[in-house]
Amino acid sequence: MSDQNYYDTLGLDENASFEEIQEAKERLLDGCEDDRKRMDAIESAYDAILMERLRLRQEGKIKVPDRIRFAEEVPEKPVVKANSGDVSKPGWLADFLDTPSRNDVLLPAGIFGILAIVSLAGPSLALAIGVGVAIYFLNRKEYRFWRALLITVLGLTAGLTVGILLGQILGPQAAAMSGASADVVTQKVAAIITMVVLWAVSSFLR
């Protein structure tokens, strides 16, 4: 097929600009989505015209915009600059953090949610079960029982500490409203906060 035939395929003449060639190709391709043979002919004509213009440019006969990419040229991948604002995680922290799936977050959330409700009736029993559940979920990630036990104990300690402090703040008001003693309210608040901490620990640590 001659050069003129390639231009005819796109409905253009040899004086067409690159933008006109590109627009013609895209317009024609949009109009023949189901005609594979026609699409191949349009693509071939487009590539042939660009190749011909590349040859003419190399011979110094025409000037082609640098933004035009030719079939035999591999497009350069854009250089992705590292974001200087990103702060890498310390090695020891990355070793402990986990990226759980949705199910790995929701299943423990459901169990610890139930235990939080149970803790309203019996905080001690709920805490005991919660510790066992946390150890189970942590241990099944890497099968390192003693590490799972240590992380669970730390989570239990943190949860109880925060929960007791919060319970002592809210205890008198909650006791006045519910009729229960301030100590009982503190125990229940501490148990609920601990369940939240144990859920976070068993879901996002390993």
Image (tube, rainbow, N blue to C red):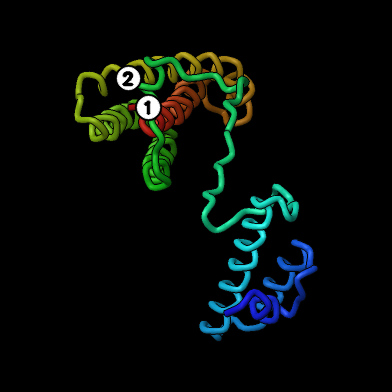
Quickly name the residue at label 1.
205
Of the two numbered discs 1 and 2 in the rendering, the one whose residue sits closer to the viewer = 1
> Taking 151 as reference, is 106 above or below it?
below
Quickly name the residue at label 2.
151
Q: Is residue 12 left or right of residue 93?
A: right
Could you say which is closer to the camera, residue 68 or residue 198? 68
Asked whether the residues under the numbered discs 1 and 2 touch, taking CB atoms below 8 Å apart as contact, a structural biologist would say yes
Helix, strand or loop at mark 2: helix
Report whether residue 143 is seen.
yes
Q: Position of residue 114 (x, y in %)?
A: 40, 42
Q: Is residue 167 left or right of residue 141?
A: right
Amino acid marked by disc 2: Ile
> Taking 149 as reference, is 34 above or below it?
below
Could you say which is closer to the camera, residue 72 or residue 103? 72
The N terminus, quarter of image = bottom right
Which quarter of the figure has residue 136?
A: top left
Residue at the spot x=57%, y=33% of the render?
80
Report whether residue 29 is seen.
no
Residue at the spot x=69%, y=76% of the render?
7
First reached walking from the N terminus: tag 1 or tag 2: 2
Marks counted in the figure total 2
Q: Is residue 153 left or right of residue 106?
A: left
Which quarter of the figure has residue 204?
A: top left
Residue at the spot x=56%, y=72% of the render?
44
CA–CA distance between discs 1 and 2? Answer: 8 Å
Amino acid marked by disc 1: Leu
